[in-house]
Image (tube, rainbow, N blue to C red):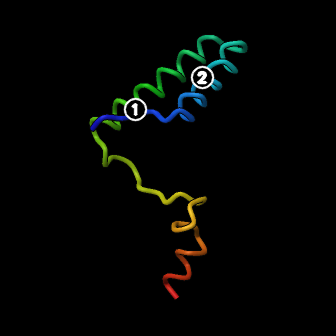
Amino acid sequence: MIVRWTRQAIRDRASIFDYLVAKNPLAALSIDHSFEQAAIQLGQFPHAGKNRPDPWHPRTSAASQLSSHL
């Protein structure tokens, strides 16, 4: 599977890196490397991990899930 980063994800990743690099350059490199490795692993094993619903999406909110079971 090919993992494609959204523009927002790229911006978030850059923001995290920029914030950390000023405080701890090694931590910034480490977390950025972790993000890259996670994307690679997701590409290799797309069904790994838990499939969790997005709490902000109207179809997967707790209220809609609850109402579907009533």
Toward which corner of the image does residue 55 lie, by quadrant? bottom right
Q: Nearer the viewer, residue 27 or 6?
A: 6
Toward which corner of the image does residue 14 lie, by quadrant? top right
Tell me, for residue 17, which label it has, or none: none
Residue at the farthest bottom position: 70
C-alpha distance separating marks 1 and 2: 15 Å
- Compared to residue 11, the image places residue 66 above or below, namely below
Q: Earlier in the sequence, mark 1 or mark 2?
A: 2
Residue placed at 55% from the left, 79% from the top?
66
Locate residue 9, reporting x and y percent.
54, 34
* Relative side of 44 to 12, left or right: left
Locate residue 67, reporting x and y percent.
55, 82
Label 1 sits on a secondary structure element that is helix
- Compared to residue 42, the image places residue 63 above or below, namely below
- Compared to residue 38, the image places residue 53 above or below, namely below
* Quadrant (top left, top right, bottom left, bottom right) of the N terminus: top left
Would you name the residue on which mark 1 appears?
A: 39
Label 2 sits on a secondary structure element that is helix
Would you name the residue on which mark 2 appears?
A: 14
The nearer-to-camera label among 1 and 2 is 2
Locate residue 46, reporting x and y percent.
31, 44
* Relative side of 40 to 11, left or right: left
Q: Are marks 1 and 2 in contact (CB under 8 Å)?
A: no
Three-letter amino acid code of the residue under disc 1: Ala
Residue placed at 33% from the left, 46% from the top?
48
Three-letter amino acid code of the residue under disc 2: Ala
Residue at the farthest right position: 23
Residue placed at 56% from the left, 61% from the top?
57
